[in-house]
Image (cartoon, rainbow, N blue to C red):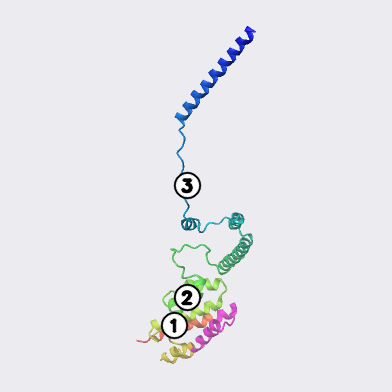
Amino acid sequence: MRTFIFLLIILFSTISASSQDSLVWMEEAVEEYPVMEEVEVRQIDREKWKEATSGLEYSENIPKEKKEEELDQELPDFESIGRTAEVIKWILIILGVAAIAFILYKILTGDPLFARSDKKLDKSSVSYAENAEEEELMEEVLDDALTNAEKAGNYRLAIRLLFITVLQNLQEYGHIVWKKEKTNLQYYWEIENEEIRPTFKTLSRLYEDAWFGEKPVFEQGYSDQKALFHKFNQAISVQKVV
């Protein structure tokens, strides 16, 4: 019986101590975390809320659509790339064909393919004599150009050079006054010497047929014509106009 009473006293003392500890903890908690004051509830201004939320989209489909649009913009247009590549391919083919044609032309005409731009022009070359204007050739000594034309078998060009040499001599010895706009017929009437005038007419016809009429000139026929030109030049020097 005494033992039972003793146990009751111990149990009561333990419960009482625990209660006091709980009260102390609650008081400390209140001091550390004071109770918030009552919050005042305010009404929202609906006009300001509408103004603040205007333009905002809340649809669940919009982000998906935006992502799809962004994805389409990021993906390359393979069809357009293919068309561009096809155009570039044909441009390169055309440029390649043009380059090959240019190289072949240079080789066939005997022009140097990569001639230096500052190199002195070879005025004795066949290509220069073929393309030069008459007034340019009138200022040149044509002996080397004539030799090169004969070596190349270009007898049409050789006839041209022989005739221009005749014009040079006619002017040098006072039979004509050379001008770019004059014709061979005008030179014919300008020559006063009756001994050389008929031969000049013959030489003019040979020149015009070969050069302007593109009449073929062969080696055998050229030799006879060249002799006629030389004979005429000798006559000019004898019939010098004082």
Q: Are marks 1 and 2 in contact (CB under 8 Å)?
A: no
Q: As rendered, which of 61 and 70 lies closer to the eye?
A: 61
Q: As rendered, which of 53 and 106 lies closer to the eye?
A: 53
Between circles 1 and 3, the one closer to the viewer is 3
Q: Amino acid at mark 2?
A: Ala
The residue at 63%/59% (across/down) is 78
Q: Please tell me which of labels 3 and 2 falls first in the chain.
A: 3
**What secondary structure is found at the residue carrying circle 3?**
loop
* Neighbour tally class for label 3: few under 14, some 14-19, many 20 plus, Cα within 10 Å: few
Q: Please tell me which of labels 1 and 2 falls first in the chain.
A: 2
For the C terminus, the image quarter is: bottom left
Disc 1/disc 2 C-alpha distance (Å)? 16 Å
Report the predominant secondary structure element of the magenta stretch.
helix
Location of residue 219 (image quadrant) = bottom right
| Disc number placed over residue 41 in the picture, else none | 3
| Residue 130 painted magenta | no
Q: Magenta region: which residues?
A: 201-224
Q: Which residue is mark 1?
A: 167
Q: Which residue is mark 2?
A: 132
